[in-house]
Amino acid sequence: MLTVVLVVVGYLAGSLTWGYWLVRIFRHEDIRTKGSGNIGASNVWRVYGRYLGLPTVLLDTAKGFAPALVGTLVVGHGTGVLVGAAAMLGHVRPVFLKFEKGGKMVATTGGAFLGVAPLVGLVALGVWILVFVLFRYPSVASIVASVSLIAWAVLLGYPWPVWAFAAVAAAGVVFLHRQNIRRLLHGEENRSTLWRRWIGKPSSSAANP
């Protein structure tokens, strides 16, 4: 029963649409009408720069981290995995936006792994940073880091529920980035525009999600 309650709490936490709310509060605009139309941190940072993008990253990470950590500490890794997955689902289809399309769950996935398997989450974060610095494609960094979760979960000796969680999370992130993959294959993913988010400059075009 406790696991069920924690899963519900995890989903509700994941449904906290920080990117949407922060833009509404500080810019009085709907992020869904800007850039890619995505409510996640990537689109918020691309369109509005780091001053709204960074808080969105941190809050989206926290909403995966906190419930997953509680589930892991109170019950165990199996429950932590289920709660983390529920938070990720909430980010993708948030109840507070009437189950309309949410974000691509990269930050929330990272937060969930920091809660369930901290070493896996930290190493995957390092992979994300390294790939981004080398190639300047956040989509590539997100895909590579998510896929690497599986290897790190096995190599670092976490139990099988964490392996399974890593596989499902990687599949989910790759699926949600399928349009980015298509653009990458056609050479249409714009690195220079995506780079602007890191130096805090809003993008005027922001065409790529």
Image (cartoon, rainbow, N blue to C red):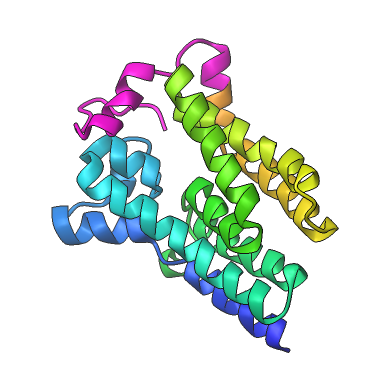
Up-down relation of residue 28 to residue 73 (above or below):
above
- Is 80 left or right of 132, judged from the image as shown? right
Q: As rendered, which of 180 and 115 lies closer to the eye?
A: 115
Judge whether 76 appears above or below 21 on screen.
below
Which residues make up the magenta segment? 182-209
Res 37 seen here:
no
Q: Along the horizontal axis of the image, is 37 left or right of 137? A: left
Image coordinates for residue 196, horizontal then vertical, percent: 27, 27
- The residue sitting at 63% across, 36% down in the picture is 174
Q: Position of residue 100 (x, y in %)?
A: 48, 57
The reply to whether the magenta stretch includes residue 192 is yes
Q: Where residue 11 sits: x, y (%)?
A: 56, 70
> Toward the viewer: 42 or 117?
117
For the N terminus, give its image quadrant.
bottom right
* Residue at the top extreme of this rendering: 187
In the image, what residue occupies the spot 43% across and 57% down?
A: 60
Is any atom of residue 12 visible in this view?
A: yes
- Magenta-drawn stretch contains 126: no
Q: Please name the residue shown 33% across and 47% down the image.
A: 32
The x, y position of residue 102, in whole percent, is 47, 53
